[in-house]
Image (cartoon, helix red, strand yellow):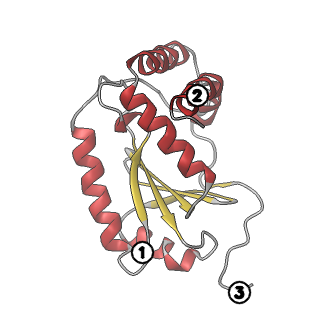
Amino acid sequence: MDEARIDVTTVEIIGGAEAGRLELHSYDEHWVSAYLDHRRRIAEALSAVRTDIEHIGSTSVPGLAAKPIVDIVVTVDDITAEEDYLPALLAAGYELRVREPGHRLVRTPERDVHVHIYERNAPAVGEYLLLRDHLRGDPRDRALYESTKRELLSRQWNDMNEYAEAKTDVIREIKARARAARGD
């Protein structure tokens, strides 16, 4: 292995756990323009690297209430070759938040944009897109997901990761219907 490669075997959360007030906002068309602005910023920063860039998460689903955090997924050829992408993203104004096996997360200092970096063809990317695309086309599952998020956000959370984990069962249900609908 090249010495410059980062061999990550544990999760590193830069800055530690963060408590925060989580709240849902009604769908805001500004989220699309924010995604497009950051897509352009990321593409320019990573112009020397082969990438795919997609808008994911609730802000990518028209009509769905969401936390006002635009999630973006970027794929690279080798996640361990941080020298190929991380310095450029940091220079573009993003901050490293998470380093874990197969995944990096950078975000804006304002914490309103999260950029998830994965290796090309990582299963997680397909899962994000499966959920996004299904929610865009299925009003019943979109309503179920929103009502689940509203119920969970009525509780106190010490960390956003705990809130995210609490949504797992309903997300699995929705993705199972999405797979069935597309014939998987």
Q: Is residue 152 left or right of residue 54?
A: right
The residue sitting at 70% across, 59% down in the picture is: 101
Relative to 177, say whether 15 is above or below. Answer: below
Closer to the camera, 94 or 74? 74
**Amino acid at pointer 1:** Ala
Does dot 2 land on a helix, a strand or a loop?
Answer: helix
Precedes in sequence: disc 1 or disc 2? 1
The residue sitting at 57% across, 29% down in the picture is: 180
**In the orientation shown, which residue stands out farthest toward the right?**
9
Relative to 88, say whether 106 is above or below. Answer: above
Q: CA distance from mark 1 to mark 3?
A: 19 Å
Crowding around mark 2 (Cα neighbors within 10 Å: few <14, some 14 to 19, many 20+) is some
**Amino acid at pointer 3:** Glu
Residue 81 in percent (x, y) is at 60, 77
Q: For the N terminus, which image quadrant?
A: bottom right
Which mark is nearer the camera, 3 or 2? 2
**Amino acid at pointer 2:** Ile
Residue indicated by mark 2:
171
Residue indicated by mark 3:
3
Crowding around mark 1 (Cα neighbors within 10 Å: few <14, some 14 to 19, many 20+) is some
Crowding around mark 3 (Cα neighbors within 10 Å: few <14, some 14 to 19, many 20+) is few
The image's mark for residue 26 is none
